[in-house]
Amino acid sequence: MSNVKKVNALRRNIMRGLTKNIGRSVLQKSGQIDKNEIKKVLISRPNKRLGNLLLITPLIQEVTDTFPNCKIDLFVKGGLAPIVFENYKNIDKIIELPKKPFNELIKYLKVWTLIRKQNYDVVVNVDQNSSSGRLAVKFSSAKVKIFGDLPENVELPYDDYDHIAKYPVYNFRYALSQFGVEDKKEPVALIDLKLSSDEIAKGKAILNGIVDENKKSIAIFTFATGEKCYQVEWWEEFYAALKKEYASDYNIFEILPVENVSQINFQAPSFYSKDVREIGSVMANSAIFIGADSGIMHLASASKVPTVGLFSGANIKKYEPYGNNSLAVDTNTNSIPDFIRIINSILNK
């Protein structure tokens, strides 16, 4: 681990220790909420990663459905959020925390002042382990503050509660139930980029310029960060198996990362773009997406393409793709023949 990573890890641990008890008593019942009277909501997720931004879209949809007359502000980090949430029409302001707060101290302080000045009805923190997220809720002047965790001794009876896109919704429902809002039992909404029909049509035209438009296409993404990235030898063996099984009936093409690298040495037709929505629109025209746990995997899921997520760690329940016949595969306990069987089960539906 580099010195910078060590310092950041230490900083996060210190901040979590300082903020972990903020808001413990907020969920005590104090009156009723009229859903139609809620006009302004802040969702706090000060994170810049593509996957983590996409993973709050189910909560945004939940808040929108619960409070039909509200406008939503987002507290995030970096400049990617306006692109990701472009087609979410009830999102009003996107409040961006600087990527490097100590290098932009004045801007950093202005962000907190802006949160304080807004007259929010409800403020929701997404990740209970986010010190900045919890502080934003505490610092706001909202009538209802939801800090992103549950009171002690409360456990919710959901098999999928560990999923990072789902537990914020379940916690939100529970918190509102303490204010007289009925706790819905409906499934959590899917991750959704909200691609327009024009975007999807553009993606189809781009894909047709790369592969045979008379065949359906299998999209693969061979890159990931850190330990989640499978070795070249692993991907070359898997790619050979994919070609043997599907090349006669399907195109197989590779989505390239921003680093423009390939674990199969660019053997497949490839697509490269830095435009998140354009990448999503191309994947939306695929029959299936296959890739390791990454932001691009979540982008595929948010683009409504059946997604096979490849996981080698213990975080499957937290990050697995869901909906649209998507699923996660543990590569520690499954082999290539298992992968092919799983892919076939999706393609043949």
Image (cartoon, helix red, strand yellow):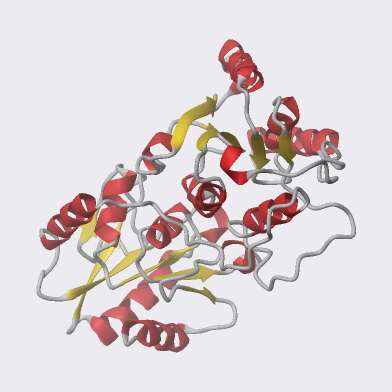
Residue 238 in the image, given as x and y percentages of width and height: 38, 77
Residue furthest to the right in view is 153
Residue 60 in the image, given as x and y percentages of width and height: 52, 47
Instruction: Place residue 37 in its image quadrant.
Output: top right
Q: How many marks?
A: 0
Instruction: Place residue 304 in its image quadrant.
Output: bottom left
Residue 267 in the image, given as x and y percentages of width and height: 24, 65
Q: Quadrant of the N terminus?
A: top right
Give 35 or 2, whichever is nearer the viewer. 35
Please say if 127 is above or below 323: above
In-image side of 213 versus 234 (left or right): left
Residue furthest to the top in view is 106
Please say if 79 is above or below 294: above
Give 287 or 246, whichever is nearer the viewer. 287
Residue 92 in the image, given as x and y percentages of width and height: 45, 31
* Residue occupying image coordinates x 68% and y 34%: 8
Give 257 or 113, whichever is nearer the viewer. 113
Give 327 or 200, whichever is nearer the viewer. 200
Instruction: Place residue 146 in its image quadrant.
Output: top right
Q: Is residue 10 visible?
A: yes
* Residue occupying image coordinates x 63% and y 29%: 120
Please say if 334 is above or below 23: below
* Residue occupying image coordinates x 47% and y 87%: 338
Q: Quadrant of the C terminus?
A: bottom left
Q: Is residue 313 visible?
A: no
In-image side of 109 versus 99 (left or right): right
